[in-house]
Image (cartoon, rainbow, N blue to C red):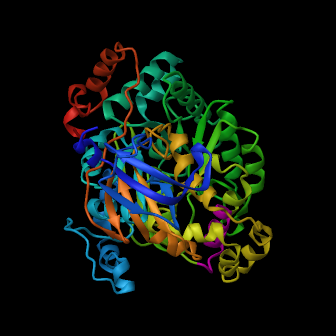
Amino acid sequence: MTARAQNDYLKIAGGTVYDPANGVDGAVHDLWISGGKIVAAPTDPAVRPARTLDARGLVVMPGGIDMHCHIAGPKVNLARRMRPEDRRAAKPMPRRSDFEGSDSRGGQFRSGTLGSTPSTFATGYRYAALGYTTAFDAAVPPLGARHAHEELADTPCLDGGFFVLMGNHHFLLDALRTREPAKLRDFVGWLLQATRGYAPKLVNPGGIEMWKQHQAGNAGELDDPIDHFNVSPRQIIAAVAQAAAELELPHPVHIHANHLGIPGNWQTTLETMRALEGRRGHLTHIQFHSYGGSPNDVGSLSSQVAALVDYFQSQPQLTVDVGQVLFGPTTSMTGDGPLGYFLHKIYGGKWQSDDVELESGCGIVPIEYKEKSLVHAWQWAIGLEWYLLVDDPWRIAMSTDHPNGGSFLAYPEMVRLLMDRDARRDVLARIHPQVREQSQLKDLDREYTLGEICTISRAAPARMLGLVNKGHLGPGADADITIYDQDADPARMFEWPRWVIKAGQVIVENGELRQSVPGGRLHVSPEFDPAIERELARWFDEHSTLEFANFAVGDEYLPE
């Protein structure tokens, strides 16, 4: 072995390793890194690493993966422009040295703004400073794909991708109306390829199209027909799930169910799970879809988590992320235009809605979650009920639906709530008394272990997304690694990583960013019948203001 090859090694020595994907739960051993990957330890005892990180007494985990957030694309930029006061009120990014008196300083970085919708540079830096190395934007309209790729290219330190909105796309609805499943499947494959997206996303399937036509309300129940197309939300869900399965996508259909945030919507959520008919599916921000009560009475909201969890646990092909609400100001942004309108009617103040021709829409509303609000207190409690009632942490991913339930910066506080029942009870004692009395939280003593936290924030999202090189620390994995100090306070522990390693490079040291590295792009290239392109070219000519030849995202939008 040459001296140059020896100098490529980075060694993490003596850390307490949590790697659920490989059955490691707090074992002490070394990790070796070379060429941006985790490798087996050299067999030659004479080999010395170029650098060794002494991790004795520290906790070693894979880099965090946020599988559902909103960090790129048209809606995020709309929110940034809409909320200058949010950015002005944001505090500067803290450093460990600010609290411990260290003289160390980070490297040179690009400027950025913070708030609930940070700018691209700030988003990458803040995720990295928490130990996150991968994130997926959850809802990008196909016509916004170029915009999303440009923003992800501007977001350092994160490997990124996005899910492509298609649950209200007119071409897809037409293929479903004419009962042409092969055409629908080929369209889904083509759309993912053309946008360089990662997975099909359904947001309020059919409901947005109904709202556009009627300017009020929403789609009704899952079997109510959508005007003009005469197809139902249930048919959309089943058809796209089937297409994803036939295309052998790494991540199944990603579903934002109908009637988000409406009291009584738990029955729609249950029917959405049933509509998959045994196919794989991921239901996102499940907290917002688990409400009892009457649709016409917001004050009647209650929890129906137990009933949904009971069915969910009998369906091993289903996964969820939570969309946890945390108290404080934030920005609601969604591809669900009717929801944005609904929230505007409740909160007043600013509201912005946008229509993407033939594809989707979005709504943006500033909100503040308050402890004494009956609705907000229920939302906080319902998210935690999901975490604590689902037995298998491999089927539930940690999320705030950033920034809808709260900022990703609140993830350390979420960890505290999951690991410390007394911390939950302290909050429970302050919130609306009706929730305190009726929520199951008061009776739930479960406390997550470090291994379970590692699962829901790293290993499980990687498995749900089909990312075989992420979320674990075995040989061949991407060398995305976070090393934490042991701390009795889980929030403090997860807020200040000692080291963060991205693709084999140390980017955070002693809690401070030391270098900015470009992120990679995660996308799929499914096989489909190219004959679909001839029909799409005619369709674009007849219906779209954009020519078909100009639609697809080129290689120049992807990192080298």
Query: Residue at horizontal 59%, vertical 37%?
Result: 281
- What is the number of callouts on the image? 0
Query: Foreground residue, 329 or 251?
Result: 251
How far from the left and from the top, in percent, is residue 27? 59, 55
Q: Is residue 276 left or right of residue 112?
A: right
How far from the left and from the top, in percent, is residue 423? 65, 77
The relative height of residue 402 versus residue 186 in the rendered view (above or below) is below
How far from the left and from the top, in percent, is residue 106? 26, 71
* The residue positioned farthest toward the bottom in the image shown: 101
Is residue 403 a member of the stretch shown in magenta? no
Q: Quick check: can you spot residue 352? A: no
Q: For the magenta stretch, what is the residue range?
A: 371-384
The relative height of residue 343 versus residue 134 in the rendered view (above or below) is below
How far from the left and from the top, in percent, is residue 90? 34, 77
Query: Residue at horizontal 32%, vertical 18%?
Result: 533
Is residue 379 a member of the stretch shown in magenta? yes
Q: Quick check: can you spot residue 181? A: yes
Q: Is residue 506 left or right of residue 282?
A: left
Query: Foreground residue, 421 or 40?
Result: 40
Q: Quadrant of the N terminus?
A: top left
Q: Main secondary structure of the magenta part?
A: helix
Q: Quadrant of residue 92?
A: bottom left
Query: Foreground residue, 52 or 530?
Result: 52
Query: Residue at horizontal 55%, vertical 51%?
Result: 217
Q: Quadrant of the C terminus?
A: top left
